[in-house]
Image (spheres, grey):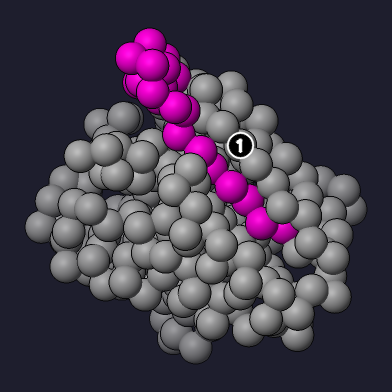
Amino acid sequence: MQILDGKFLAAQIKAEIKSEVDLILSEGKRAPHLVAVLIGSDPASQTYVKSKAKHAEAVGIRSSVYELDASTTQAQLIELIWSLNQDDSVDGYIVQLPLPKHLDESKIIEAIAPHKDVDGFHPVNLGLMVAGNQNAFIPATPFGILEIFRRYSISTTGKKVAVIGRSLIVGTPISILMSRNTEPGNATVTLLHSKSNHVKEVCLDSDIIIAAIGKKDFVTADMVKEGAVIIDVGINRVDGKIYGDVDFENVAAKCSAITPVPGGVGLLTITSLLQNTLKSYKLKQS
């Protein structure tokens, strides 16, 4: 059984990004610039935004954070988004989710300029991703999952893949990416969700399981066939500890490879954001 080490891959990817940014700076050009917009005081969101800023600065990407009060109105947030859309010094930005309940998440995402949408959530980027356009910004977590398959040389061609969870952030995009005519990809994909029947049977028949449903230990050993590859996207906080969607302790023994939580996909979500920021910068220069 192989542990798919997100920390190791993240360090590798960050070194590659830093090398590119160092070259950009050596040519006398400005550094790529990533902005995060944080509304309210959600502790998990604050921690995540600080982590993004720390990782960006470590590879030479300029990082800025706008911290807005939880009472910020829709109009005020749209006004900030519009100014970021027009700011040529900003290559990419994210509006940290979840938003306070009085803000319309869909309208906020749609207000972001697609060419600066490094989270990959804008409908234009999702459409380009479906079409296989190379200029699309792939959502960060699915992008990180692809990097795991690529860098650990895990072939997905012809494999049966079960994706558990249908969010637009992870489940739906990774199910599309896994079915595209490319490698990673070329898989036969079943997208499972809260209304699915026969979840256990589908998982038992799958070569690869991607768990992104947000329920601690949802995937148990009796749902996994011998030699399966398990990608655990879950981050569930219980009594101050972080758990995945997979019962790691009991499932790991049956797998050929598995991502841990923490230390797996989550770290690659951040590096994917940095990769998208660098990509946005380079697209502007070309």
In the image, residue 120 sits, relative to residue 274, either above or below, namely: below
Query: Which residue carries the number 1 mark?
Result: 63
Q: Residue at x 47, y 59 (%)?
A: 86
Q: Is residue 160 left or right of residue 82?
A: left
The stretch drawn in magenta includes residue 24: yes
Q: Is residue 182 left or right of residue 113?
A: left
Q: Residue at x 46, y 28 (%)?
A: 31
Q: Is residue 213 left or right of residue 226?
A: right
- Say which amino acid is labelled 1: Ser
Residue 261: x and y in percent read 62, 42
The stretch drawn in magenta includes residue 249: no
Q: Which image quadrant is residue 113 in?
A: bottom left
Q: Residue furthest right?
A: 239
Total tally of numbered discs in the picture? 1
Magenta region: 16-38
In the image, residue 60 sits, relative to residue 65, either above or below, namely: above
Residue 9: x and y in percent read 44, 26
Q: Circle 1: is it few (<14), some (14-19), or many (20+) Cα within 10 Å? A: many
Residue 142: x and y in percent read 40, 54
Quarter containing the C terminus: top left
Quarter containing the N terminus: top left
Residue 188 appears in view: no
Q: Which image quadrant is residue 136 in?
A: bottom left
Q: Nearer the viewer, residue 203 or 85?
A: 85
